[in-house]
Image: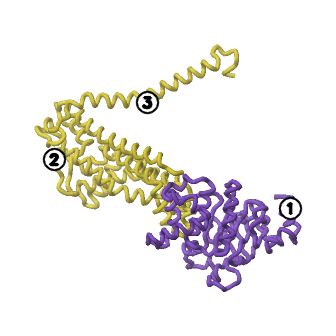
Chain colours: A purple, B yellow
Amino acid sequence: MVSGKMGPIVRIESVSYAYGDRQVLKGVTLDVQPKAITIFLGPASGGKTTLLRLVNRLNDLVDGTRMTGRILFDGQDIYAPGTDVPSLRRRVGMVFALPLPLPGTVRENIVYGPKLAGIRNKGRLEEITVRSLSQAALWDEVKDRLDAPANSLSGGQQQRLCIARSLALEPEVLLLDEPTSGLDPISTAKVEHSLFELKRQYTIVMVPHSVQQAARVADHAAFFLMGELIEYRAGTELFTAPRDRRTEDYVTGRFG
Amino acid sequence: MILSTKSPMNRHQVQRLGFVLLTCVALIVVIPIVLVIGVIVVRGVKAINIEFLTAMPREGMKAGGIFPAIIGTLLLTLGTALAAIPIGVGGAIYLAEYARDTWLTRAIRLAILNLAGIPSVVYGLFGLGLFVLFLRLGTSILAGSLTLAIMTLPIVISTAEEALRAVPTEFRTVSASLGGTRWQGIRHVVFPQALPGIITGVLLGLLRAAGETAPILFTVAAFFLPRLPQSPFDETMALPYHLYVISTQVPSMPLKMQYGTALVLLVLVLSINVVATAIRSHFRRRRQW
């Protein structure tokens, strides 16, 4: 995205989505603003994770699904025929709920994406390793263990490694699906802290693992219920003065 | 109730009895293999010497060595590997990673299952018809290797497919999310993880091929050919067939020649087996998931 050009970086236009007979998204329309943290909030099976995975076409890997509507990234319909999906996924990165290091060392995990993208220069790869691990607030802890197996790190470190691995590609958008769900409070704080640093440079879309977390980090927040987008506003407003009764019930903890 | 309190045996005794019976059953499985190996080693070891392993057969195969049969079996195994590995592993990758559940893939799976159930002598006839006669390869190492390869394919495909499926789906998703194509994910993540399982499957398949007689009977094996094969289109002697010949077709054959040949074949096949087991356990310890 050309810097300075404002307006949404991702536009979701009346997207409906079904796994077989199960409708998980019903006509969702929503704009994601650049260089901010957008939160997809709501109880389980509201379609948040599915929507996240639609933005970088990861759900292409799932059989038997049906989608209508459009998703635009940087003005382009990403489901248009002829879209270069691997390059889309480099520009729209994803971090999953569970830390999933690839087999191999810390370093190999970081350089996996860049190498596939065609970067061979060792110095350049080293630079990427240092930068992305620093951005994910992990560098100090692993700088002496870059060649250790990635799964020898603690759970919290592994999850930050996964964030670093996505950042290695310098994506424009970073999709985070409950990135702290398996983490202890200290690791969670570290990840959240790094999010504040990251949003200066990246657009972040995140499914939080609690309402409290959502309230801590959200610039914009969308509330989903059973596949419908109920309310989408600036984070502070959604949490302090929700317009819809259902949103209010959820953020104040009456259900969910 | 069987285990009522009035039963003459208490639960503890029943437990012990069951344990003893099951142990006996398990031992019955071990006895034949120990006997087979024992008898062949004891009777065959006298035949083993440098001449036996490195010389051509002499005096109507009653003396001399079995060198051409050893080399023939090694060449046939190599030829089988060259044909079966690319096709088998490629097929497994297709089935495990690309194929969707359609009538076509179901038909392929059914075919593989049936291929595994075909008696080996039928493969021999098939090889004779297709490779030797129709494709005019003649009775040759090429025809024999291809016949053995077809027989080996089901084992290779099904073990390799299983090894690929055992690699967690998440690795494929992660690779895709980092901009990898499906093939790159397979090439760089899934395949290396599945490799030990695939190697094991290939070796087990080759093991079976190395020991088979019927498929090579009409396609490659020479009754008596006291020289080494000159090209892939040449006939060759092979251990299993040689063993069959000297055990049934040649009168007054010294017994130690037969047991010696059996011992060499057994050692060859078992050493492949040991290698397969060693690879499997080595990588299992290093597995990262």
Quarter placement of the N terminus of chain A = bottom right
Nearest the viewer among B30 and A186 is A186
Badge 1: residue crowd in 10 Å (few <14, some 14–19, many ≥20):
some
Judge from the rendering whether residue B136 lies leftward or rightward of residue A51; answer left or right. Answer: left
Query: What residue is shown at x 27% (from left), y 51% (from top)?
Result: B76
Q: Quick check: do tags 1 and 2 share a chain?
A: no
Q: Secondary structure at mark 1?
A: loop
Q: Nearer the viewer, mark 2 or mark 3?
A: 3
Question: Which of pointers 1 and 3 indicates the residue nearer the eye?
Answer: 1
Q: Is residue B54 above or below residue A224?
A: above
Q: Toward the viewer: A127 or B151?
A: A127
Residue B128 in view in this figure: no
Q: Amino acid at mark 1?
A: Thr
Q: Position of residue B184 (x, y in %)?
A: 48, 66
Q: Is residue A247 visible?
A: yes
Q: Residues within 10 Å of mark 3 (few under 14, many from 20)?
A: few
Q: Residue B29: which disc?
A: 3
Q: Which mark is residue B225?
A: 2
Rendered-image quadrant of the C terminus of chain A? bottom right
Tag on residue A252? 1
**SS at circle 3:** helix
Query: Which quadrant of the structure image shows residue B49?
Result: top left
Give residue A183's quadrant in the image.
bottom right
Q: Are marks 1 and 3 on the same chain?
A: no
Instruction: Give the residue at x 57% y 62%.
Output: A139
Q: Circle 2 sits in a helix, a strand or a loop, which is it?
A: loop
Residue B78 lies, in percent from the top left, at 29, 52
